[in-house]
Amino acid sequence: MSLVRRARPEDASEVLRLRQIMIDALPGGDASTHWHALALPGLRERLGEPDGDFAAFVVDHPDRPGALAALVVGTLDYRIGKASSPHGHSGYVFSVATDPDARRRGYARACMAELLAWFRERGAGQVMLTASPEAEPLYAALGFVHKPDPTMILTL
């Protein structure tokens, strides 16, 4: 039996806690948590939609009942097709986090395997993510490669 399970609405606070751990580790990450209360209702709603375009896979913390040890979150988007993804279904991984005291146990890898299977089941032709230097070996082992993409962002 897998340690990984699909996150449920009651996991929303823990999902936000782990997401904040990830944000705090990013260069220029914003350590503020005031937004958690605003994000919680929408996240609970999305976690309660098992057939939607949003999925979160988690591992329960083995030493702390009610806490999560690891988290992987992704969305399925439609983009106009291209050679590598003719149907236009594209996966995007945007949160991968492991509680500091639960690292190096393979939890993030196991969660990623479940998310990638979820993307495949939904016909995604490609999966994109942004990798921290620490996580690059994991993603490379799963088959991810660097893309010379001049991505830019505008915060609204």
Image (cartoon, rainbow, N blue to C red):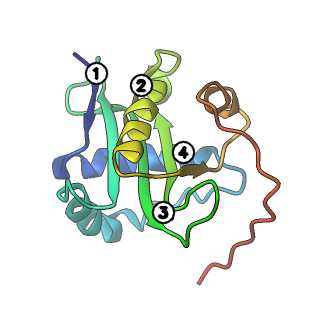
What SS does tag 4 mark? helix
* Earlier sequence position, callout 1 versus callout 3: 1
* Earlier sequence position, callout 2 versus callout 1: 1
Give, as a three-letter code, the residue at label 2.
Answer: Ala
Mark 1: few, some, or many residues within 10 Å (few <14, many ≥20)? few
* Earlier sequence position, callout 4 versus callout 2: 4
Whole-percent x, y for residue 8 in the image: 19, 47
What SS does tag 2 mark? helix
Q: Is residue 115 left or right of residue 145?
A: left
**Residue carrying label 3:** 87
**Residue carrying label 4:** 22
* Earlier sequence position, callout 3 versus callout 4: 4
**Residue carrying label 1:** 3
What SS does tag 3 mark? loop
Residue depicted at 58% across the width and 29% down the height? 142
Give, as a three-letter code, the residue at label 4.
Answer: Met
Q: Nearer the viewer, mark 4 or mark 1?
A: 1
Q: Is residue 74 above or below residue 43?
A: above
* Earlier sequence position, callout 4 versus callout 1: 1
Q: CA distance from mark 4 to mark 2?
A: 17 Å
Whole-percent x, y for residue 133 in the image: 74, 36
Residue depicted at 41% across the width and 43% down the height? 120
Q: CA distance from mark 3 to mark 4?
A: 32 Å
**Residue carrying label 2:** 110
